Each structure stands twice: as C-alpha cells, then as structure tokens.
Image (cartoon, rainbow, N blue to C red):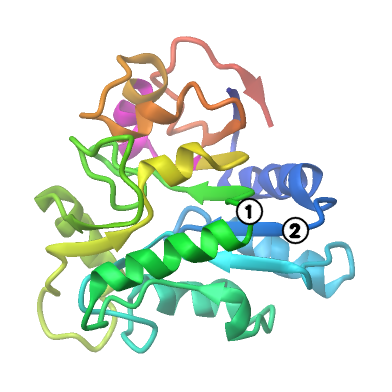
Amino acid sequence: MNIWIADTPDALALKAADDLVQRIADLPVRLLCPASGDTPAGLYREMVMRVGRGLLDMDAWSFVGLDEWGGMNGQDEGSCRWHLDRQFFQPLKIGRERIRFFDGRAADLNAECSATEGFIREKGGIDLAILGLGLNGHVAMNEPGSSPSLRSHIAEIHPSTQQAGQKYFSNLTHPGNVDLSRGITIGLADLLEARHIFLMVTGAHKAAIVQKVLEGDITEEIPGSLLRDHPGLNVYLDAAAAKFLANHKQQA
C-alpha cells in the first residue's frame, strides 16, 4: 500500500493521473472502473486534458461502471452514470460499445449484475478501479457488513449513505429527497481482484474514517479496510483527510 498526501485536491488529481499513466497506459487491454462523485472529478478533468493534448491515448480502453442507484440510469439527473457522462465519457467521446454500466431502471437487476460480471470476464478483469470512501467506510455500494466474496449485486443502502447521497440531487429538478434506499454495485470480490486500486479521499469530514480504514482493524464492518492488503493499492489523500493518521507515508 502506498499513501500519497497532497496539500490540495488539484495536486492530488495530478499525482493520481501521473500514476494512472504509469500503471496501465502500456497494457494491451485496459479495463477501467471509475467511481462517480466529487473526489475523483479532478482526476477525470486531468485525464480529459491529457487526451486533448495528445499526452494520453485511451482509444483501446473499455470501462465498467462501479455502481448505480436503484431505479436510475443515465437519463436521470444526478445518477452515477449522469455524472460520469458529463465529467468523463462525453468529453472523451467514448462510444457506448466500450462502456458497461448498471441500469438501475432495468426490470431484472440480477441480469444486470450477470451482464456486468460477463463484461469483466470478457475483458480479462479490471485493470484499475478508482474508488471513493463513504463516511461509514463503504466502497462503491458495499455497505458495512458486506462480504468480501460478493460480486456484482443489489445492495440495501445504509441510511447514512442515503443522506449523504442527497447532495448529488440537491441542485437539480427533483422535488424533495430522492429514494436512495437501494443500489446495484460491483462487489468487493471484483475490486480485490483488480490489478490496481486508487482510493481517493478528501476533506476533514472523512479524516476519522480514513484513520479507521488505514490504521484500524480489518473488518467487514468497515469495507474500505478490506482493501488494505491489496498489493496494488494506492491511497490519495489531501492533508485534511489525512490529519488523524499516525504515520504519513509519502507526500505527493
């Protein structure tokens, strides 16, 4: 595990982009699993910029979505796919045939899980998963108590995650709170089999859970802690998120 700490989220995004190019740009087949959310947005902007300047070639890459809210897909403002389309897929003009993303509106969500697992197998596994971290330690929609043997599955969303998720809809056209009680997500087993994992966390409000994930017990009750022994884990923190760590490993 490598831990990188930067003074600002922009510096963190730059370091993560440099590492991404180093880790996977030369692989013959590349399957990227990107998280939606505020924290990795800077990394995606940096990747889009590098492609535009000819510094990064992503023409041979494929993409598998990390998770989606139940009852939503890319047509829904605020959904995971909606955000990634605007931050990443559309600026890079990535064709739909190169993307496998959960459709939370599908009649058969179990079939969605099977299709995602098939796509991952077809591509030879996930080369790089870009993850955030929830306030309760969840990664993707693998909530506390999730088994590390789980693959793509339908998830019951913890109330704290539902509350935190409302921020993605607060400035949109939805009246009141959105139902975020269920999700569909790639499982911990898939993530633990990825060749590389980038865990990105920013903000003082995440400092306590960062300390538990990186220095506390490894337990299913804090799913992020299960990533700690992964040989390809890189953790990217800003100074605020790292403030409770006993040992600052490396500076970005």
The residue that appears at 42% across and 70% down in the rendered structure is: 115
Q: Is residue 32 above or below residue 224?
A: below
Question: Residue at 33% across / 84% down in the picture?
Answer: 77
| Mark 1: secondary structure | loop
Residue at label 1?
124
User: Badge 2 is on which residue?
Assistant: 29
The image shows residue 96, relative to residue 129, as above or below, that is: below
Q: Nearer the viewer, residue 43 or 185?
A: 185
Say which quadrant the N terminus sits in: top right
Q: Which mark is residue 45?
A: none
Which amino acid type corresponds to the residue marked 1 in the rendered image?
A: Gly
Q: Residue at x 26, y 75 (%)?
A: 169
> Which residues lie in the magenta part?
200-211
Q: Quadrant of residue 43?
A: bottom right
Q: Give the amino acid at mark 2.
A: Val
Q: Which secondary structure type mostly characterizes the magenta part of the structure?
A: helix
- Front residue of 205/154: it is 154
- In the image, residue 210 lies at what x, y percent? 38, 29
- Residue extending farthest to the right is 54
